[in-house]
Image: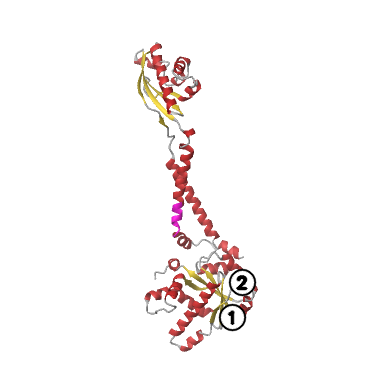
Amino acid sequence: MENQRYWQEGMDWKRIFLLWGKKVWLLAAAGLAGAVLGGGIYLAVCVLPAANREYETVSKLYLNFNCEPEDFNELSYNGYTWNDLMATDPILNITMENLPPEIGRETVIGATKAEILSDIRLLTITITADRPELAAQIMEATQASLVHLGETDELFESIEIYSTTEPEQIVWDNRTARAMITGAAIALLAAFLAAAFYYVMDDSVYVAEDLRKRYGVLAMGILTEESRRDKENDGGVRNRGDEEGHSRTGFEKELLANYCYLCRGMKKVAVVSVDSAEDGEEAAKRIEQLMEEANLSEKDGAAAGNRRKSVCVAFGMPEEDGDVYRRLRDVDGVILAVRFGGRNGKKIERMMGNLENQDCRVVGAVIVDGNEKFLRMYYGERH
């Protein structure tokens, strides 16, 4: 039943925002790491390996046809046939004669691309190879065979070499930036899902509603980390005229009011911690101090005397001392001390179940070591 309530309690978006607010840098770091990783993987797989490197050299050759320009469209040498012609014997044989014997015909055919891009008189030859020196060798031999063709074929007056580029490594559609963006997006999504999963699995208590909704126990109040430090620094004595000190005791005043009402008519109230004996002792001691301060400032002596009838004491950890349950049955009420953000939901369930089994009356719970900044932002308090 407790688990069912926990899963059905819904999302407290304000609490999520405040809990994640100080961890936004983790999402940013995840995105940056994903970008670096994505770009690195792309470079490692697609750019850096020697097996993926290719070098390209391009040459422009001018074809001087032995006919009038109006007859060019009737020529057999056009943009659709040059790529095939480069692999025919009249051209390829001359190319192979100008190459070392270890370079095969299939290598030359696979490396060579011939095309007419615009003007039928301008032929573009592209040689692609896995080594720059091989690309340069094939280009030089191919140019020699085409110049020879211009000298021997009656359709040409000549074939002239206009320009040739040095072999350069090909960057195949460099997508490093895109890979980085993809990596960052995947990392951010994974980080967000991990954070969401962490939030769902986090059964910590942060605010009073967590105790009420999940465990059906009343939250008397909250003792903050700041109030503990202040108490240790000033020996437990506060100046009521100091406005700063007054603002620091806001949650404590709420605790005092709820304690006085919920424990009215009780002579002895026990505090049992879910997390550690020190937390229980701290909560009981602070409640007693608050009661004492309230009694000292109370003008109505009768009211003060009535308030002092309730004594708050800390008991040990039940799982460490089985006799604690017997002593808890002898008191008028039990208060649970629950640590703020302690990932202690299952401990609370276990403690509540054991207290119920032992017929111990739970009157409420106190959250200890609460983060005052978080709590003030959550409850919308300015001071």
The label nearer to you, 1 versus 2, is 2
Q: What element carries label 2?
A: loop
Q: What element carries label 1?
A: loop
The x, y position of residue 370, in whole percent, is 48, 69
Q: Name the residue under label 1.
A: 332
Report which quarter residue 122 is drawn in.
top left
**Label 2: few (<14), some or many (≥20) within 10 Å?**
few
Badge 1 or badge 2: first in the primary sequence: 2
* In the foreground, 357 or 89: 89
**Magenta stretch encompasses residue 27:** yes
The x, y position of residue 296, in whole percent, is 44, 85
Which disc number belongs to residue 69? Answer: none
Say if residue 365 shows up in the picture. no
Residue displayed at 56% across by 83% down: 267
* In the foreground, 226 or 300: 226
Report which quarter residue 298 is drawn in.
bottom left
**Label 1: few (<14), some or many (≥20) within 10 Å?**
some
Q: Mark 2 points at which residue?
A: 320
Give the quadrant of the N terminus.
bottom right
- Does 238 appear above or below 347? below
The x, y position of residue 192, in whole percent, is 49, 54
Residue displayed at 44% across by 27% down: 128
Give the quadrant of the C terminus.
bottom left
Identify the amino acid type marked 2: Glu
**Magenta stretch encompasses residue 86:** no
Report which quarter residue 314 is drawn in.
bottom right
Horizontally, residue 153 falls left or right of residue 310, namely left
Identify the amino acid type marked 1: Asp
Q: Give the range drawn in magenta.
A: 22-29
Horizontally, residue 154 falls left or right of residue 358, namely left
| CA–CA distance in space, label 1 to label 2 | 22 Å
